[in-house]
Image (cartoon, helix red, strand yellow):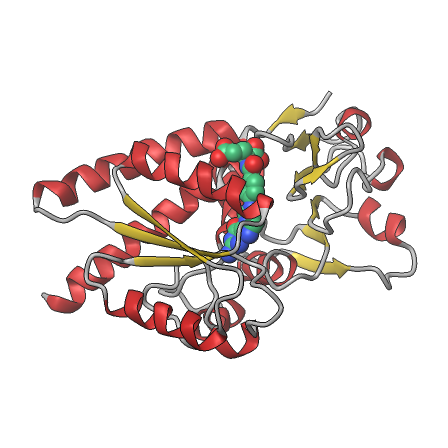
Amino acid sequence: MADILSGKEVAQALGEKLKGEVDQLKSRGIVPGLAIVIVGDRPDSMSYIKGAQKKCSEIGIDCRLVQLPEDLSEKEFVSKIHQLNEDRNVHGILVMRPLPAHISEDRVKYEISPLKDVDCFNPANIAKVMSGEEGGFAPCTPSAVMEILDHYGIELGGKRAVIVGRSMVVGRPLAMMMLRRNATLTICHTKTVDLAKETSRAEILVAAAGKARMIKKDMVGSGAVVIDVGINFDENGKMCGDVDFEAVKDVAGKITPVPGGVGSVTSTVLAKHVIRACRMLIDSEA
Ligand SMILES: Nc1nc(=O)c2c([nH]1)NC[C@@H]1CN(c3ccc(C(=O)N[C@@H](CCC(=O)O)C(=O)O)cc3)C=[N+]21
């Protein structure tokens, strides 16, 4: 039976540290502020927002929900983003994805101020993740993976890491973040010829494909660290990851559960980024 890597434990430890930092800011009369922008009411986004609001209130961050109607025009959306860029009480802006089809993510992503872009929407921040430059904002979900690895002292240097999934929100940026820590990276995807062969070689295996329980026991090497980024719902409406947890836990060395794994750290990383954005603003005015 593998050791369980508890995202809840990581979120708890990080959250306590962040609360201390916010208390210090508040003693100077500063309250970190986050605006969450959602167009429409997609259930996956709404469920994340609920968790993020709760996390912010525990830590002491002022969290404002900007819920916009589904039929909002792209122009109106951009003008709302500009308004938040200018708002002095808003240090971080999170735009929920995906946006409705009539708002082009490729056009609007440039509009959010990179200094407030706490979930890496703007290509200026993506570029920093790709080049390994510090000081930008990496997306919260891959950052949550790194928080878990760091919390449990899991070394990346020289390790064979395999990521299943090449999305711009998880797989690709995570590959660059692990590469920066000197892991040897393989990225697998739907056109990978022998997926099981690739994943079995992994010392650190990350499942980020968005397919319920697709990583089976015979795809995992003995003793591997298995990180499950998937959030799916099975035929019974039960939340599950991309990993067949019940079977894989008998072969893996360490494994994250779903729920209670990566997805339970994401909102705490978001809070961390808001606090950093707040400090960046203070420093730029000092
Ligand atoms: N720009 C953007 N960033 C996102 O991070 C983002 C997004 N858009 N769009 C929607 C998806 C969905 N998503 C979830 C994350 C965790 C849970 C979740 O339930 N997580 C916990 C439980 C809740 C908690 O502890 O807060 C768990 O895994 O145990 C659900 C949904 C983020 N998303």
In the image, residue 136 above or below residue 262: below
Depth check: give the residue in front, 23 or 251. Answer: 23
Across and down, in percent, residue 257 comes to 64, 30
Farthest-out residue, right: 193
Image coordinates of residue 31 in percent, x first then y, are 18, 47
Quarter of the rendering containing residue 80: bottom left
Residue 244 visible here: yes
Side (left or right) of 207 relative to 279: right
Identify the residue shown where x is 77% and y is 27%.
236
Residue 108 in the image: above or below residue 37: below
**Residue 1 location (% of width, % of height):** 73, 20
What's the residue at 52%, 47% (across, down)?
146
Quadrant showing the C terminus = bottom left
66 vs 173, left or right, is left
Q: Nearer the viewer, residue 180 or 56?
A: 56
Ligand 1 is found in which quarter of the picture?
top right
- Residue at 30% over, 39% down: 18
In the image, is residue 222 above or below residue 77?
above
Circle count: 0
- Residue 78 or residue 119, whichever sits in front: 78
Identify the residue at horizontal 33%, vertical 39% (top origin): 56
Residue 47 image point, x, y percent: 53, 39
Does the image show residue 14? no
Among the 4 quarters of the image, the one containing residue 278: bottom left
